[in-house]
């Protein structure tokens, strides 16, 4: 694959990661409910709801900040045409998307 083919693929992976991170940050209620069993009490919901911001929001905020840093470097042309960097970035983003999908449905 030529370097010109890696640039759009890397851009799309970064945008997909950005969109997924923002969606997870904005859908707090559904993420809290996904962490609970089917039959849960209001006390269980309240305990997970207070636990949610301290863990997930901090992690997602750090991920969002680092992603913005990476996008600035990419858009600035610092690492846009490095083929090895593009392949590492694409592979990393795909692994992160799969891990987030698994973690969001397993109760973390």
Image (spheres, grey):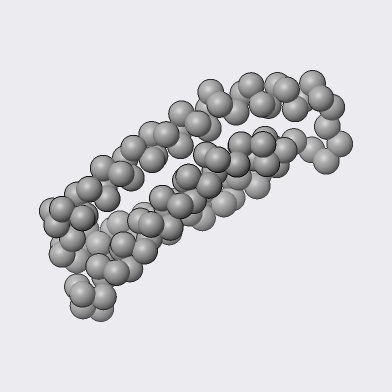
| Residue 55 can be seen in this image | yes
Q: In which quarter of the image is residue 83?
A: bottom left
Residue at the spot 30% in from the left edge and 57% down from the top edge: 89
Q: Quadrant of residue 49?
A: top right
- How many callouts does the rendering have? 0
Residue at the spot 38% in from the left edge and 57% down from the top edge: 15
> Which quadrant of the figure contains the C terminus?
top right
Q: In which quarter of the image is residue 38?
A: top right
Between 87 and 80, the one lying in front of the other is: 80
Percent of width and height locating residue 5: 26, 75
Percent of width and height locating residue 105: 65, 47
**Farthest residue toward the bottom?**
1
Q: Is 59 situated left or right of 32 in this image?
A: left
Relative to 90, residue 50 above or below: above
Percent of width and height locating residue 71: 27, 50
Residue at the spot 15% in from the left edge and 64% down from the top edge: 81
**Farthest residue toward the front?**
26
> Which quadrant of the figure contains the N terminus?
bottom left
Residue at the spot 64% in from the left edge and 21% down from the top edge: 50
Q: Is 74 situated left or right of 65 in this image?
A: left
**Farthest residue toward the left?**
78
| Residue 107 can be seen in this image | no
Relative to 93, residue 4 above or below: below
Percent of width and height locating residue 68: 30, 44
């Amino acid at each position: 694959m030529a370097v010109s083919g890696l640039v759009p693929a890397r851009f799309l992976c970064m945008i997909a990661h950005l969109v997924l991170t923002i969606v997870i940050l904005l859908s707090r209620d559904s993420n809290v409910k996904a962490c609970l069993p089917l039959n849960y009490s209001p006390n269980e919901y309240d305990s997970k709801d207070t636990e949610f911001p301290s863990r997930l929001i901090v992690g997602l905020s750090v991920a969002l900040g680092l992603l913005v840093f990476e996008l600035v470097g990419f858009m600035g042309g610092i690492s846009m045409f490095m083929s090895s960097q593009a392949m590492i970035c694409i592979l990393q983003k795909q692994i992160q998307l799969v891990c987030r999908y698994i973690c969001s449905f397993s109760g973390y």
